[in-house]
Amino acid sequence: MAYNLDQKTVIITGANSGIGKAAAIQLAQLNATVVLACRSLDRGAKALADVKSASHSEKIELMQVDLSSQASIRRFAENYQCRHDRLDVLIHNAANFDHTLAKPTLTADGVETILATNHVGVFLMTHLLLEMLRNSAPSRIITVASKGLLLYPFLDIEFDNLQGERKFSTQHAYYHSKLAQIMYTYALAERLQGTGVTVNCVQVTNVAIPEERLTHLPAWMRKVYALKRRMSITPEQQAQTYVYLAAAPEVQEITGGYWDENNQQVRSNRKSYNRQTQERLWAESERLAGIQR
C-alpha cells in the first residue's frame, strides 16, 4: 500500500547511512518533509544529496545532533522548534556499537558513551520534543532495539552496573542499552495513553553493513561480518518496518508494541515487562539526562 505523508514532518536520527538513510529515502518518496539528524555534517551533507536524488524530493533538511552530548541534543531541539511548527514522527535510529572500546568511556555529561547515545540521549530528545509531538497529534515515536537480544533471554537492567562500573564489554553495554530502549518504550507508551502520541519499538534483525563502515575493525571481526552479511537483509528491507510504523493508518492507534522485520508484533525479553524495573529505569534516566521533575 502506498501511503501519503504530505504535510507530515519526520525526524530520523543517524540518517547519514544504513537503515536511517534508507528510511529517509522511502519516507521522502511518500511526500514527507524529512529532517536528517546527523552527528557529522560532512557525512550528513552527502546523505542529504543522496536522499534528494533518490527520492526526487526537495523536502529534505539536514540538522546536526550528537546523541552522546546533552548540550547538542538541547541545541537541536531548540533549533528544530524555531524552524518547524510541527513534528509528526520521531524515529530514534542512531546507535553506538563501538567495538574498539575496551573499558567504559564517559561523555562530558558523565554518562557511559554507549548508554548515552543509545538510551539517555533518546530519553532526553523525546522529553524536549514531546510537547510538539502532543500538539501535532496524532503523532508517532519509533525506538529501535535489536534481535540480538534473543541471545540474552535473562538479561536485566543492572542498576549497579549501568555504566560498566563492575564489568564492561561493548557487546554487553550495547544490548543493555537496547533492553533499556524496550523498557522505555513500554513505560512511555503507558504515560502517553489518550494523548494521540504512540510509541513503538523496532526489533532490528541482521542487516548488511557496508564494508566501508567496518574498516576500523580488526581483520577477524571483518570476516565475522562478512559471514553475517550472507544471512542479512538489506537496509532498505529493514527500513520498510520504520516506514510502516511511521505511516500505516492501521497502526495509528497501536502503542507499546515490539515489531519485527515482517511488521509483526513479537514478544521482547521477559524481564522487559517488569513495571517496577521500568519505573526505576525511568527515574535513573531522568537523573542521567539532567531532567528535573
Image: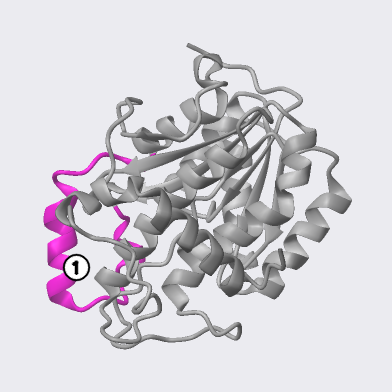
Q: Nearer the viewer, residue 148 or 228?
A: 148
**Mark 1, residue position:** 222
Percent x, y for residue 136?
77, 32
Residue at left 85%, top 40%?
Answer: 85
Secondary-structure class at tag 1: helix
Q: Within the image, what quadrant is residue 107 found in?
A: bottom right
Locate residue 72 relative to residue 251 in the image: left or right.
right
Q: Is residue 45 visible?
A: no
Q: Residue furthest front?
A: 276
Q: Is residue 211 magenta?
A: yes
- Is residue 71 on the magenta stretch? no
Q: Nearer the viewer, residue 40 or 94?
A: 94
Q: Viewed as shown, does residue 257 lie left or right of 62?
A: left
User: Can see residue 240?
Assistant: yes
Q: Residue at x 29, y 75 (%)?
A: 170
The quarter of the rendered structure image containing the C terminus is: bottom right
Q: Residues within 10 Å of mark 1 (few under 14, many from 20)?
A: some
